[in-house]
Amino acid sequence: MNNSDSIIVSPQTLEKMRTELEELTGPKRDEMAERLQRARELGDLKENAEYHSAKDAQGLMEARIRHLQNTISKAVVQERTDSDEVGVGLIVTVDDGDDQEDYLFAHSAEEKVPGAMTITPSSPMGNALAGKKVGDEVLIEAPNGSFRVKISALRPAE
């Protein structure tokens, strides 16, 4: 596998994706088939809003299944970073002078932690924060302009 095709994830995220995929391709697909069958039984499919709604939901579910299958097939597991520098698996608390925000520093948008937004190294903010330490002030060049933040805390994601 080409490294550029790899998607780096934590072991926990890979397990969550596998569990979600199993649910979607098993019980959820069965529920969707039943929903479509009930909608078909309501009559004329051209004017059947229930049927069209079910078909739309089925399309979204199948797209999510394909996304999960693709991500899992390219997943490379990387353990959390235990470091005093911003790295994968750490929650970075930044202060912009007005308030503080928590961000999960992750290689994949699939990585999520309640109460924290996810940033990746390829994002402007992630690129600017990578490798920095608590107390560092960082200039972030974003598409809508530049802003400064101070790293006020680092902690492992739970």
Image (tube, helix red, strand yellow):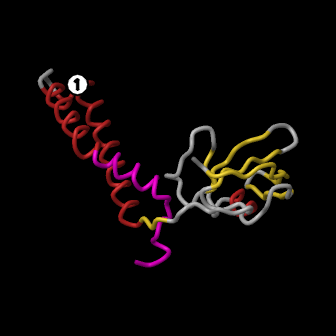
Q: Nearer the viewer, residue 11 or 4?
A: 11
Report the quarter where the N terminus lies: bottom left
Please state the horizontal and vertical placement of residue 46, each as a whole percent of the image: 20, 29
Q: In the drawing, does residue 39 fall left or right of residue 97?
A: left
Question: Regarding mark 1 in the picture, which secondary structure is present there?
Answer: helix
| Frontmost residue, 89 versus 125 | 89
Q: Is residue 158 above or below residue 142?
A: above
Dot 1 corresponds to which residue? Answer: 47
| 17 relative to 118 in the view: left or right | left
Q: Give the residues in magenta.
A: 1-22
Q: Residue at x 83, y 58 (%)?
A: 138
Q: Is residue 139 left or right of residue 104?
A: right
Instruction: State yes or no: residue 14 in magenta.
Output: yes
Q: Quadrant of residue 14?
A: bottom left
Q: Residue 72 appears in which quarter of the rendering?
A: bottom left
Identify the main secondary structure in magenta: helix
Magenta highlight on residue 9: yes
Circle 1 Cα neighbour tier, 10 Å, few/some/many (<14 / 14–19 / ≥20): few
Could you tell me residue 149's position as x and y percent? Answer: 83, 51
- The number of discs equals 1
Q: Amino acid at mark 1?
A: Glu
Pick out the residue farthest to the top.
Answer: 42
- Which of the two residues, 82 or 86, is positioned nearer the viewer here? 82
List x then y, in percent, for residue 27.
Answer: 22, 38
